[in-house]
Amino acid sequence: MNTSNFIVLSPEVQHALDNNLPVVALESTIISHGMPWPQNAITAKSVEDEVRKQGAVPATIAIKEGKCLVGLSSEAIDYFAQAQNVWKVSLRDMPYVIAQKLPGATTVAATMRIAAIAGVKIFATGGIGGVHRGATATMDISADLTEMGQTNVAIVAAGVKSILDIGLTLEYMETLGIPVVTYGQDEFPSFYSSKSGFDSPLRLDSATAISDLLKAKWGMQLDGAVLIANPVPTEFEMGQDAIEQYILNALEAANQQKVKGKEVTPFILKYIADHTKGESLETNIALIKNNARLAAQIAVAHCK
């Protein structure tokens, strides 16, 4: 069966791909599971605007009525921002959600796979999943990483989510052969903060240089993603020590309430937003826009 039977491109995205114009994939988990209404819809649309301002076409990805949608209308964004019982779809959930014709918001792994099938090479998100704290006991490792090991899509993110074990996540990406490039600094960022205490494996300082790396990697048929870590703008970053304490408190609360699996990350992000009087949400919005901006610049360079 042809995978294209399950993919529906918006007219704007179809036109861009047909004419070798720059396109940036965006995920939808942030819309359905990352923020409250109406902040989620406002943010999703402003992120798309950032992509357009840089001369690229946004392709927000979600699943509805048995189809993977690549490029959402304004009305569709509002739907995913308000609908109840939208699935948080990773790779293992995709066939079920598609076959059952359920609404689904795509995680990094699912968005990457759909983007790759559609022919979109550059993807902007907030932060990727990775190796969870305590994974030596729980084996809780995000499917984002294994997908990055095999799918030819570049991801612009503000590092890995700081609720994870950053050191182990970097080690695991090295094992999978995933180049990790930090934009404009030597230290790997940690989502809410530009600092993590870990050196970045690689550093590049321009969208063109990053595009050249992508062309070299995929031109050599070295399959898999490249992670481009884009530090949160300094005026929006939160203190590393302060955020770490909120994370530890959130993890303890999640443990006490027996929150498990894919519910952990939304629970912790909401806990931190509630306990920082929304400061973390403001940081989250700023870094996603910043990532969309850089991703669009890379997409433009990559099309030249």
Image: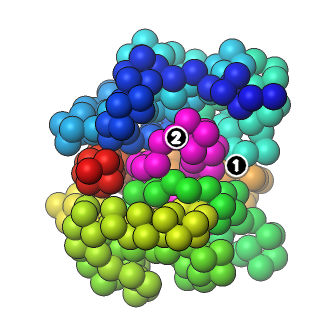
Foreground pick, 205 / 220? 220
Where is residue 139 shown, x and y percent of the image?
80, 70
Q: Which residues are magenta?
A: 107-130
Classify 216 as above or below 54.
below
Task: Provide the secondary structure element on which disc 1 rests.
Answer: helix
Where is residue 103 shown, x and y percent of the image?
66, 22
Crowding near the residue tagged with mark 1, few <14, some 14–19, many ≥20 C-alpha atoms within 10 Å: few
Classify 43 as above or below 83.
below
Foreground pick, 281 / 76? 76
According to the picture, the residue beneath numbered tag 1 turns out to be 262
**Is residue 69 one of those drawn in magenta?**
no
According to the picture, the residue beneath numbered tag 2 turns out to be 119
Q: Quadrant of the N terminus?
A: top right
Asked whether the residues under the numbered discs 1 and 2 touch, taking CB atoms below 8 Å apart as contact, a structural biologist would say no
Q: Nearer the viewer, mark 1 or mark 2?
A: 2
| Residue lying at 36% horizontally and 37% vertically, measured from the top left | 20
Seen in the image, is 160 located left or right of residue 42?
Answer: right
Residue type indicated by callout 1? Lys
